[in-house]
Image (tube, grey):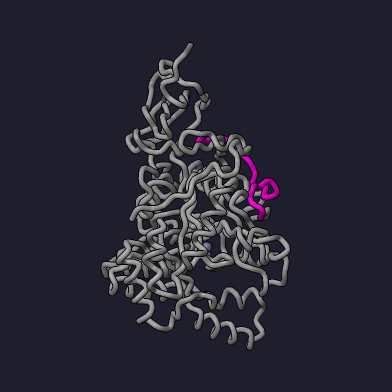
């Protein structure tokens, strides 16, 4: 009888490492990468998978995802959202707190975790919103969250964003617990003022939307919150940077010594506001899509290292909500199943180096959010991996998404690069768009700060 020494041998692969691509295979033992192997046949294992010469990358870590569930499960639930992640090659998802109920109390966080444990198929960590009672910050932090998120444009927030003393108190509390604050850079008062001015001028609905969320307010908010970050010693992560003015604001903040990281989404890199004018509410998103010049500035910031992460901002809604008249339709669309193929297409065209992409989508988010033993293919690291066919050409068909949101502004885009298999701790959770593990296979990650 053969005795098994490792749990999985993956053979005939090209393995991405920062020292270069290794042709061969690897062995997984107890969920970890055990060894890279030139001749994998020599190791005994119960299970062998032939990678058919495809490229093995570290699993994607997406730090900006709205999995919804609970009272918003009609938009997405923990199962469908994490199936979408697995299909997109995403092995770890960081979930946002703007749900119903909001994840801004110990009770709400516990409820979310309990529900997630029953349904998820990939790794999930949670963000929280700041609680009404500031004394609860510590208790929430101790639950292993990845950070606190603020939405200064959202009237439902527990914080008064006009009150800098209050903001500073919360920032200090986050800093004391070694947690970053994630910022949606906007400002409710500015939105309201601009909106009513544009409505008075009888501007079309789409122009009112675009005009009330200008790049200047985003950049101002970045400067305002990063100044408060410097004052309080709080680390910030700026979400979905969308404009050239914001890139300038970020550079300025870094020069002033802010402890600041930031992310960009594929849609802000690739689309312009014309897409909203063409597709209407289906392409409505916050921050809005902007201009070609903004796309160019964002790519430059990605390439020169000012932007640290590419995140999806997967924001599912029901089709009937998106079909409402433009002003009432919610912002956002799904992104988990399009992020990697869209970016691999940039690699195929020679616009982005593979090494840079892998850094932006795996190593860098793991480092920023302190996800231990993740984000790289290294011996001893978690065997969270994605196998991609770099050559396959296909067309984005949102009707095939695992997400409940079966629409996308990227519908019918031709892309190059297909996710073949996704592995979590050495178990193949998805192969050729099929989910192979039961609900609850994934684990909630508690982050050690
Ligand atoms: O378009 C967006 N949708 N932007 C956000 O910041 C929130 C998100 C959502 O939750 O739907
Ligand atoms: Zn978001």
Q: How many marks?
A: 0
Farthest top residue?
A: 1
Relative placement, left or right, of 257 versus 310 is left
* Front residue of 119 and 380: 119
Q: Residue at x 40, y 69 (%)?
A: 136
From the top left corner, tell me how far across and down residue 60 is, in percent: 47, 45
* Front residue of 383 and 303: 383
In the rendered structure, does residue 87 fall within the stretch colored magenta?
no
From the top left corner, tell me how far across and down residue 157 is, in percent: 50, 75
Q: Is residue 313 visible?
A: yes
Whether 355 is drawn above or below 335: the answer is above
In the rendered structure, does residue 404 fall within the stretch colored magenta?
yes
From the top left corner, tell me how far across and down residue 211 is, in percent: 56, 77
> Where are the magenta residues, as a range?
387-405
What quarter of the picture does the C terminus occupy?
bottom left
Q: Is residue 290 visible?
A: no
Q: Residue at x 49, y 57 (%)?
A: 64
Relative placement, left or right, of 67 versus 325 is left
Residue 433's image quarter? top right
């Amino acid at each position: 009888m053969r005795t098994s020494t490792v749990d999985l041998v993956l053979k005939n692969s090209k393995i991405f490492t920062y020292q270069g691509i290794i042709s061969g295979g690897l062995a997984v033992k107890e969920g970890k990468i055990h060894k890279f192997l030139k001749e994998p046949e020599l190791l005994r294992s119960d299970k062998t998978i032939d990678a058919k010469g495809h490229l093995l990358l570290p699993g994607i870590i997406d730090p900006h995802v709205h999995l919804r569930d609970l009272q918003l499960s009609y938009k997405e639930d923990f199962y469908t959202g994490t199936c979408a992640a697995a299909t997109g090659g995403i092995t770890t998802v960081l979930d946002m707190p703007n749900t119903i109920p909001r994840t801004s109390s110990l009770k709400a966080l516990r409820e979310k975790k309990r529900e997630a444990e029953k349904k998820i198929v990939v790794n999930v960590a949670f963000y929280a919103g700041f609680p009404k009672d500031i004394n609860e910050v510590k208790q929430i932090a101790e639950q292993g969250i990845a950070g606190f998120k603020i939405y200064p444009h959202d009237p439902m927030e527990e914080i008064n964003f006009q009150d800098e003393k209050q903001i500073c108190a919360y920032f200090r509390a986050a800093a004391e617990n070694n947690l970053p604050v994630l910022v949606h850079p906007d400002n409710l008062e500015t939105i309201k003022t601009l909106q009513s001015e544009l409505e008075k001028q009888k501007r079309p609905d789409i122009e009112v939307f675009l005009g009330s969320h200008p790049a200047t307010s985003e950049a101002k908010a970045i400067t305002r919150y990063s100044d408060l970050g410097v004052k309080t010693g709080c680390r910030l992560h700026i979400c979905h940077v969308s404009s050239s003015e914001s890139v300038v604001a970020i550079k300025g903040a870094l020069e002033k010594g802010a402890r600041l990281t930031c992310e960009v989404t594929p849609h802000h890199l690739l689309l312009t506001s014309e897409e909203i004018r063409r597709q209407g509410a289906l392409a409505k998103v916050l921050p809005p899509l902007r201009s070609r010049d903004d796309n160019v500035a964002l790519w430059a910031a990605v390439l020169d290292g000012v932007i640290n992460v590419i995140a999806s901002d997967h924001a599912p809604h029901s089709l009937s909500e998106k079909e409402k008249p433009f002003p009432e339709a919610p912002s956002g669309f799904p992104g988990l199943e399009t992020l990697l193929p869209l970016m691999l297409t940039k690699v195929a065209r020679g616009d982005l180096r593979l090494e840079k992409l892998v850094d932006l989508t795996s190593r860098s988010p793991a480092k920023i959010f302190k996800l231990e033993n993740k984000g790289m293919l290294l011996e001893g690291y978690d065997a969270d991996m994605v196998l991609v066919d770099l050559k396959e050409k296909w067309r984005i068909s949102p009707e095939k998404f695992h997400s409940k949101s079966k629409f996308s502004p990227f519908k019918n885009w031709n892309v190059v690069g297909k996710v073949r298999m996704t592995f979590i701790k050495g178990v193949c959770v998805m192969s050729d768009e099929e989910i192979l593990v039961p609900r609850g296979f994934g684990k909630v990650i508690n982050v050690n700060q």
